Amino acid sequence: MPVLIAARSADLDLVRPLARLLRSDGGEVRCYLDTDDHELRHLGCKIAVGALDDAYNLEAALTNVHTFVPVLTDPFDIRTPEDIGQLRDMGLASAEAAAGAGIAQTILPIPVLPGIHPVTAIFAEVEKAFDAGVHPLCRLRTGYLWGDERPLPALISAVRHHGVDLPEGVCVSVLGIDAWAAAVAAADDREDLDGTWELGGEIEPLVDLLDRADRAPANRAETKNPPDAWGLALLTEDLIVGSSADEFA
């Protein structure tokens, strides 16, 4: 059954491995993106390019789609009030489109965040909008995502480069991109899931993430800029996310 993934160009490093897994099982994958992507076309995906905050066009793209996977902005990619506004607009447009299209299955990967942070309330608002209008709804609540092109390794690299002190003793749940994609694909295989599952990954002390970031060369070019305050604020508290989504494996 057709799957539609909606995402920004900044999140193609998530979309590609997920699409590859879905295509490997013979599935039809469509993508609604804010830019074209030749790699996804090469995988056999059908691409529609449009504004991610346009609920009308997104609902049209969901015609004859069985499963909808909206990929929301990574919390470490939100640095300004404008970024918050874009996240809110995309999230609410996706919820409105899914509700209007009557999708058989929606899989919503959404991050778990500390309670006191400017972006926490926006993700909660988006999740509430999906919960109000979309059923069944499989919510995959994730830890922080890690990969060569993810913003978290870039932030950690900038922390080390600029000599910024991180709080001692903080531990966070870190989820690799391949594990994220595998869990979303497995949820798609299960069909009609309704409820919330947690996707935590490995629990990592921040001091260990400093070493891991050194092994992510794709992010080294970004160390010239000092780490942003909102990103650092996410790393001031423990974030331990369960791993009940292991049942999808």
Image: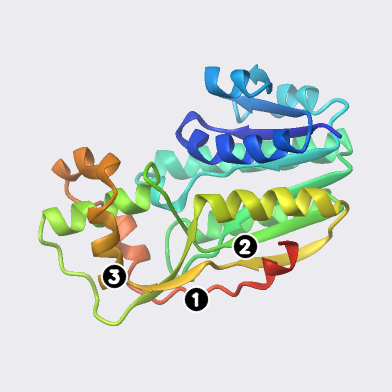
Residue shown at the point (56%, 34%) measured from the top left = 16
Residue shown at the point (24%, 80%) measured from the top left = 168
Q: Which comes sooner in the sequence, label 3 or label 2?
A: 2
The residue beneath circle 2 is 141
Query: In front: mark 3 or mark 2?
Result: 3
**Residue 132 placement (x, y as % from top left):** 80, 54
Instruction: Name the element at disc 3.
Output: helix
Contact, mark 1 vs mark 2 (Cβ under 8 Å): no
Camera sees residue 35: no
The residue beneath circle 1 is 240
Of the residues shown, which amino acid type is indicated by label 1? Ile
Q: What's the distance in space between the residues labelled 3 and 2, CA to CA?
A: 23 Å
- In the image, residue 222 sits, relative to residue 116, either above or below, namely above
The residue most toward the bottom is: 169
Q: Residues within 10 Å of mark 2 (few under 14, many from 20)?
A: many
Q: What's the distance in space between the residues labelled 1 and 2, CA to CA?
A: 11 Å
**Residue 154 placement (x, y as % from top left):** 29, 48
Of the residues shown, which amino acid type is indicated by label 3? Asp
Please give left or right for residue 115 compared with residue 198 in the image: left
Q: Residue 63 lies in what quarter of the image?
A: top right
Residue shown at the point (17%, 43%) measured from the top left = 225
Camera sees residue 9: yes
